Amino acid sequence: MFTTPDDCNSMIVKVSGNERPETFFARRNKQATKSRDIGDNCKFSYNVEVQYKRQQEDKTLNIIVTGGAGFIGSNFVFYMIEKHPEDRIICVDSLTYAGNLSTLESVMDNPAFRFVKLDIRDREGVEKLFVEEKPDVVVNFAAESHVDRSIENPGIFLETNIMGTAVLMDACRKYGIQRFHQVSTDEVYGDLPLDRPDLFFTEETPIHTSSPYSTSKASADLLVLAYHRTYGLPVTISRCSNNYGPYQFPEKLIPLMIANALHDQPLPVYGEGLNVRDWLYVEDHCKAIDLILRGGRVGEVYNIGGHNEMRNIDIVKLICAELGKPESLIKYVTDRKGHDQRYAIDPAKIHGELGWLPETMFKDGIKKTIHWYLDNQAWWETIRSGEYRNYYEKMYGNR
Ligand code: NAD
Ligand code: TDX
């Protein structure tokens, strides 16, 4: 057990398990500690910089969440604050076009939460934050995440998704960490044929990417595993299928179709709309990551998906029906280059090892999501009235 007096630079350390407290703190703080026996199997340690209480039975964690102003990252922040109020969340986000500080409004004043505007590629800034916050855990959501943008401009995907991940892991190596978790995607496996519904992605499926986006994510995954093997960094990786839910940027299929339908604008379906995605409600993804952080095996990859495969066209029709809009709004447009046909996850490993199962059925989740966009029109209207207009014109203007 480790306990910390509130207001001093010293601490009482109860020796338990195999680990010597000096080793623990030298590892954690990169500082030699001095200590003396004070009986009852305890030592009094000093000359260590102690910033928070740590107890093995009731362990509080300092968790850096990168990309926390984006879609899944913000939902993860909300999930963690609710589920683990004892932990401290430090949200790091550079606020690209996809990051939105207003999303985090409800937690900004929470003492267990801190927002830091920082680019994960900024090595100096990242190191400074590690010195300040001494994180126990880093969960890396920060990424360029849109396939269509990666086809237009791959460079930034390589910089953020690969180099940014390397910068974070270098800081983890330098200052010590209990866990670095990389949020990855099922797209690293490439795609499955439409006529083989019996096939699923397992963790053993070879990496076989299609787009610059998925290639950048796969590269990061390989780097994460290399840091584990080479440097012993305690890493885990999750590869999730398509998420949907509140606060998703309206460039992605579901929010784009909801927003366009509400404006009676054309609904641009790529190709024939027959591509299949495996949809998961965002909160189920957050829950899975939390389970991996607490119980997942270091060095392992976990697939996350809910066996909920749907064709794009069926999703668009369902949105029309739910909103009472005519299907005549649907416009078939030129297909995405290199368009992956089907994604489908086999989640047997995370289910077997950690007991994870999706809780939200698609029929309920999609209704909740549609109603969230109806109730929070200001959130997405603000986005659509800005730079998004130029983006939309460029991507869909002459399609
Ligand atoms: P998003 O685009 O909504 O959010 C990304 C966030 O990262 C934004 O807040 C952005 O400002 C921030 N960011 C981008 N570059 C940064 C940088 N250099 N430094 C700091 N912050 C930066 O993405 P999302 O859909 O929430 O996806 C989050 C993660 O989950 C990504 O890593 C993505 O690859 C992965 N993922 C997404 C899905 C999905 O369906 N959306 C599925 C599986 C995996
Ligand atoms: O306007 C559109 N019309 C259309 O038909 C858009 C934006 C998409 N689509 C199609 C393309 C895909 O087959 O819908 C499907 C879903 O597209 P996206 O929402 O762009 O998602 P996808 O390309 O499948 O990637 C998503 O899931 C995996 C996320 O954006 C990634 O970050 C995640 O890794």
Image (cartoon, rainbow, N blue to C red):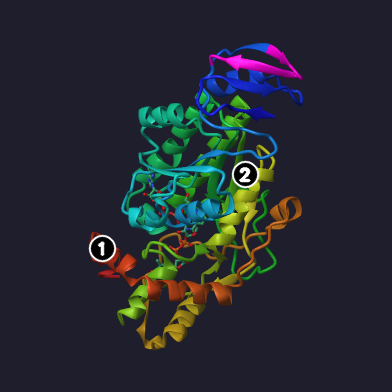
Q: Amino acid at mark 1?
A: Lys
Secondary element at image label 1: helix
Q: Residue at x 64, y 64 (%)?
A: 358
Seen in the picture, residue 178 relative to 186 is either above or below; the reply is: above
Seen in the picture, residue 234 relative to 377 is either above or below; the reply is: above
Secondary element at image label 2: helix
Q: Which residues are magenta?
A: 37-47
Name the one closer to the observer, 256 or 56.
56
Name the one closer to the observer, 223 or 29.
29
Please name which of the two marks, 2 or 1, marks the residue nearer to the observer.
Answer: 2
Q: Is residue 171 magenta?
A: no
The numbered mark at residue 293 is 2
Dividing the image into four quarters, tell me where ligand 2 lies: bottom left
Q: Is residue 43 magenta?
A: yes
Q: Quadrant of the C terminus?
A: bottom left
Cα–Cα span, label 2 and label 1: 40 Å
The numbered mark at residue 394 is 1
Q: Residue at x 61, y 41 (%)?
A: 236
Horizontal arrangement in the rendering, residue 115 relative to residue 58 (left or right): left
Residue 200 percent location from the top left of the image: 66, 61
Q: Amino acid at mark 2?
A: Leu
Residue 229 percent location from the top left of the image: 63, 29
Q: Quadrant of the N terminus?
A: top right
* Residue 70 figure quarter: bottom left
Q: Kindly tell me whether residue 178 is visible in this rendering.
A: yes
Crowd tier of the residue under label 1, counting other residues whose Cα lies within 10 Å: few below 14, some 14–19, many 20 or above: few
Q: Kindly tell me whether residue 240 is visible in this rendering.
A: no
* Residue 386 figure quarter: bottom left
The numbered mark at residue 362 is none
- Report the predominant secondary structure element of the magenta stretch: strand
Q: Residue at x 45, y 75 (%)?
A: 370
Residue 197 percent location from the top left of the image: 66, 69
